Image (cartoon, rainbow, N blue to C red):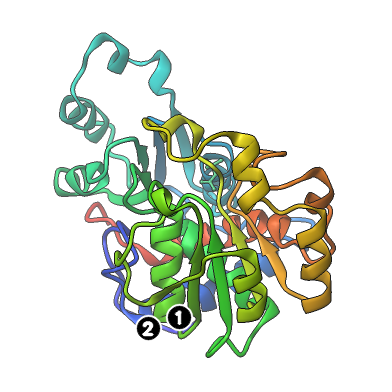
Amino acid sequence: MSELQPRKDLLDIESLELPEIEYVLANAAPFKQLFQRSVKKVPTLRGKTVLNLFYEPSTRTSSSFEVAANRMSADVTNFAVSSSSVVKGESLLDTIETLQAMRSDYIVIRHQAAGVPQIVARHTGASVVNAGDGYHAHPTQALLDAMTFREVFPDFQGRRIVIVGDILHSRVARSTSTLFHKLGVEVAVLGPGTLVPEGRHEFMQRLRSWEDVFDWKPDAVYLLRVQLERQEGAFFPSIAEYHRMYGMNTERLVRMRQTGAYLMHPGPVNRGVEITDEAMGYERSLVNTQVENGIAVRMAVLHWLKPETD
Ligand code: CP
């Protein structure tokens, strides 16, 4: 594995330098090879502790960090926010101070408010990994997306990806588009006008219809989950209308097959909203590979970060 100066925290994609991104992606590959062995564990983090602190629901991210830490022989604590003193009104900083006294080496945090991982990182010597904060960032999702895309297209430069859906509320769209742009992939977006903020990322081309998408010839179509829990206003007339306009349906799947484009989705999926059952079985779907690569990338991230407790 190549060498690079470690950092304490991973909070977003914007602050990452290209060699750091390449380092994590390069190191994720050998960690993935480990999964083929009968013994999938390495002693890299033996004696270290990883605290999973999820203030928002998660399946993929929380479980893959747990699996990643276990495979590196770390001790893992999953802090159950819903049954903790947080529900009695304990402040975030008081919670962090309490957890700090337990001397965790790594804190993996997801929070509904943007910026919370940054605050936590300033108040602890542990390495903090942002596992998703509000609409802001989801850096490990972006890294696993890049690893998955690169496995299919080792010649990353000049490839094309279109992100479809709720760009406005999506930390995945923000982090993944920024990372792909840094790596030389062309990025376009498609979605309802109310959910695609004009001019937020000047590097992203705005497409207006699926016809535009297929004319643009993307190498991958990345469907976003419609975040029904974040829709405070009426951003589109109805779920049925969203599905008709932007969902991956039978007709669009035929076009996908003709062009050979791959399909990606960060999960969890809303079947019948952004994707049909039929499209979930598409032979060029990378969704399961994204989940598998999530473990390898998170192992590479934990391997790279250096807590002050070291
Ligand atoms: N992609 C993602 O963040 O999924 P979870 O919400 O299940 O962690």
Observer-nearest of 189 and 154:
189
The residue labelled by disc 2 is 19
| Disc sitting over residue 47 in the figure | none
Observer-nearest of 124 and 12:
12
Spatial separation of the CA atoms under disc 1 and disc 2: 5 Å
Please tell me how many numbered marks the rendered image carries: 2
Residue 164 at x, y = what percent? 55, 58
Instruction: Give the crowd class for mark 1: few <14, some 14-19, many >=20 residues within 10 Å.
Output: some
Observer-nearest of 46 and 188:
188
Residue drawn at x 26%, y 44% is 114
Secondary structure beneath disc 1? helix
Name of the residue lying farthest toward the top: 88
* Residue 136, visible in the rendered structure: yes
Residue 100 at x, y = what percent? 23, 35
Secondary structure beneath disc 2? helix
Residue 202 at x, y = what percent? 32, 74
The residue labelled by disc 1 is 22
Residue drawn at x 31%, y 13% is 87
Instruction: Give the crowd class for mark 2: few <14, some 14-19, many >=20 residues within 10 Å.
Output: few
- Where residue 107 sits, quadrant-wise, is top left
Horizontal side, residue 305 vs residue 237: left or right:
left
Residue drawn at x 31%, y 78% is 17
Compared with 104, 197 (above or below) is below
**Badge 1 vs badge 2, beta-carbon distance below 8 Å:** yes
Residue drawn at x 49%, y 40% is 236
